[in-house]
Image (spheres, helix red, strand yellow):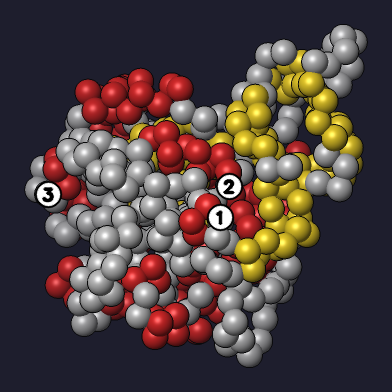
Amino acid sequence: MICLLKNGYIVDSVNNFEGERDILIKNGVIVPLDSDKSMPEKVIDCAGLTVIPGICDMHVHLRDPGQTHKEDIFTGADAAAAGGVTAVMCMPNTTPVIDSPEKIRDIIERSKTAKVKIYPCASITKGLAGEELTDFAALKQAGAVAVSDDGRPVGNARLMAQAMILAEKVGLPIISHCEDFSLAEEYSRISENVVTTREICLANDLKVPIHIAHVSTKEAVESIRIAKGKGLKVTCETAPHHFSLTDKELTRRDADYKMNPPLRTIDDVLAINAELCGGTFDCIASDHAPHSADEKSDFDNAPNGVVGLETILAVTLTRLVHMEQVHEQPFFSEWIEKVPLMKVVEMLCVNPRRILGIPGGSLDAGSPADITVFDLNERWTVEAEKLHSKSKNSCFKGMSLKGRVKYTLVNGEVVYNGV
């Protein structure tokens, strides 16, 4: 099929192009505009809309297998499509844990009919137990794109060092959940900072890469900034809730504001915002973590986690591009420099794919036609009950956002139409 996206405002950071241009798609691939004189079978008028490479969310919990009352591959893919996300990496803390080639192949096979592209992440240790490494080479051959014990730290530093060396040898990125359980309950921020520092020291001494997940404290941000300045192979991500909300939200005693890492102070939020502008952060990822309403009904005992696939783009645009609040608490006494759309595209669309080694991220001819089209200025209110996810535990529920997805295309097919 031939499809033409016309009159759109293109933002393509790989080619350093920003401006109005048409995009021609043939058989799921972007082709030169003059390559086919046939009349397109489908024309999408993108006048007044922004067109970017499809978003890649490299931190998603699909809860499949074993916890499908919260989410499954297909409802998670529906939520992703509605949020302008064309590719997700699903984390391995499922039931059972995704720790074998057979389980990787099962995810890949069942995902073939999902609306978006699903890339599985395998666990670093068998059963997430932190005791014995999985077979990284076999996992990669089966189709894993990274390894992580996300949801739990690898507590043993020697074992983590061995994992980092092995992951680099076989060409798999290793993603660290930075938390020291012995400190976590009473010293949550220290817990994150200690393990972040450990991972940076290991990366430095071993001369191997590490990716730090869901960075949330100003101290962790500073440690990573310094490490990158020294040329260490350290990459990192943060989540929209960590650059737009503070721990003041917890006074609501609503478990939809409980996640791990938790919401932090205004100083942490400002530090993250500064380095989203400054270049320390490589990626923005949702850390989409669905839980049922029953599980979230008791604030004190509720599990940590919030859904985020459908709001990742809108919150990013609202806070970083439009520089607006997402809630009624005007707690910011100052603001940081606006983040250009080109930089947003790098963090949402390009860098996650670069780190994971998966295709896409450009609107060049020859690239897969995975594309996100949105209205930069349309304002909308998050209605949790209308989210596509099985679970509705959004920390942005009831909040006004600016920037709304209109079309999501995967391999040239429209998988979401919000017009």
What's the mark number on residue 66? Answer: none
Instruction: Say what secondary structure mark 1 lies in.
Output: helix
Dot 1 alpha-carbon crowd within 10 angstroms: few under 14, some 14 to 19, many 20 or more: many
- Front-most of residues 106 and 249: 249
User: What residue sits right under mark 1 in the picture?
Assistant: 312
Q: Nearer the viewer, mark 3 or mark 1?
A: 1
**Residue flagged by tag 1: what amino acid is it?**
Ile
Q: CA distance from mark 3 to mark 1?
A: 31 Å
Whether residues under marks 2 and 1 lie with C-beta atoms below 8 angstroms apart, the answer is yes
Q: Residue 196, relative to residue 149: is it above or below? A: below
- Which residue is rendered at x = 29% and y = 24% of the image? 106
Q: Hey, what amino acid is under mark 2? A: Gly
Spatial CA span between label 3 and label 2:
33 Å
Residue 45 shows up from this direction: yes
Q: Earlier in the sequence, mark 2 or mark 1?
A: 2
Q: Position of residue 213 (x, y in %)?
A: 39, 57
Residue wearing tag 2: 83
